[in-house]
Image: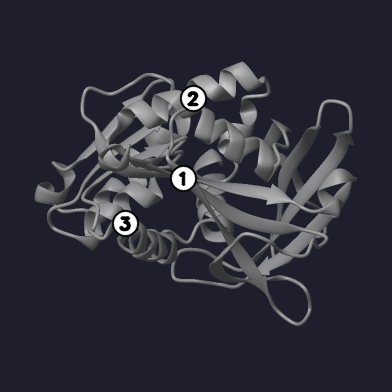
Amino acid sequence: MKDLFYKLYEEAVIDAPTDIKLFRKIFLEKLKFYPETYREDFCGTFNHSIEWIKSNQHNEAWAIDLSKEPLNFGRTHNLIKLDEVQKSRIHILQQDVRKKLTKKVDFITAMNFSYCVFKERKTLKDYFTAAYQSLDKKGLFLIDVLGGSLVQEPSEDKRRIPKSKNIQRFNYFWEQFNFDPITSEAKFAIHFQGPDSKKKIKNVFTYDWRMWSLPELRDLMLECGFNKTYVYWEGSRRNGTGNGIFSEREHEEDCLVWIAYLIGEKNAYSL
């Protein structure tokens, strides 16, 4: 059953081909060369690392997560998407993302707001510092950020995920249970529901996070040594939902729910 849940999560949440294409474009815009070495922190079933390897024959990836279960799912279900030569260029590690690697990389990401498990500023600073030190002399560190007034109150979002070659149609629910304005902590859960079922499978994945703000995160990146930070803001459709198109911004109007990418640039040659 757990394997099915990971498949549903991948179908509902992850679009690695689109993400990697955008990330490579941003990297080229900012640092004027295409990155080849990539580290996917909090990688889960490491879809982005798989796509990174597939996108270029010279690319190499390190997929890092502390949890054994999603890594094992990825080994069973996602590594088969690579041939033997490609498999030699991906390294799957079960360890704390704050542990520095011997190999420095061009590009690091922490997706799906996963760094929000670090609730104390010192702990998050330790992680950002480790990411900075793990980058080569020129590199980028990218995280996604969730915000908006609706993220400060209980809510539930439902999406119908259409049938694909991998899975039948199903309903996906993202629920926020609470928000503490003193600590900025919030709890969330993902539920699933089959196409012919009236009953949800509740709390399949749960999250206990601190909701860090963009100014806090930008200040912390600069404090950890990054030369510059950039915010790429997601545009919206007429109905107010995100359109998946991200553009660099320094100012933007608030909305009920927004998603942005925050990027820290390391460039030792400009120091």
**Residue 171 horizontal/vertical position (percent):** 70, 62
Name the side, left or right, on which 155 lies relative to 247. Answer: right
**Residue 116 horizontal/vertical position (percent):** 63, 33
Q: Earlier in the sequence, mark 2 or mark 1?
A: 2
The local secondary structure at tag 2 comes to: helix
Say above or below: 88 vs 239.
above
**Which numbered marker is on residue 271?**
none
Confirm whether residue 197 shows in the render.
no
Please rate how many residues cluster around mark 2, counting C-alpha atoms within 10 Å: few if below 14, some from 14 to 19, many from 20: many
Residue at the far front: name it. Answer: 271
Quarter of the image that includes the C terminus? top left
The quadrant in which residue 245 appears is bottom right
Q: Amino acid at mark 3?
A: Glu
Query: Label 1: which residue?
Result: 228
Please rate how many residues cluster around mark 1, counting C-alpha atoms within 10 Å: few if below 14, some from 14 to 19, many from 20: some
Q: Amino acid at mark 1?
A: Lys
Q: Amino acid at mark 2?
A: Tyr
Marks 2/3: CA distance?
Answer: 24 Å
Confirm whether residue 62 shows in the render.
yes
Marks 1/3: CA distance?
Answer: 27 Å
Residue at (45%, 64%) from the top-left corner? 166
**Residue 84 horizontal/vertical position (percent):** 11, 48
* In this view, the mark in front (2 or 3): 2
Say above or below: 39 vs 95.
below
Name the side, left or right, on which 2 lies relative to 16. Answer: right
Query: Label 3: which residue?
Result: 51
The image's colour scheme reads one colour
Residues at circles 2 and 3 in contact by the CB criterion of under 8 Å: no
Q: Earlier in the sequence, mark 2 or mark 3?
A: 3
The quadrant in which residue 233 appears is bottom right
Marks 2/1: CA distance?
Answer: 18 Å
**Which numbered marker is on residue 127?**
2
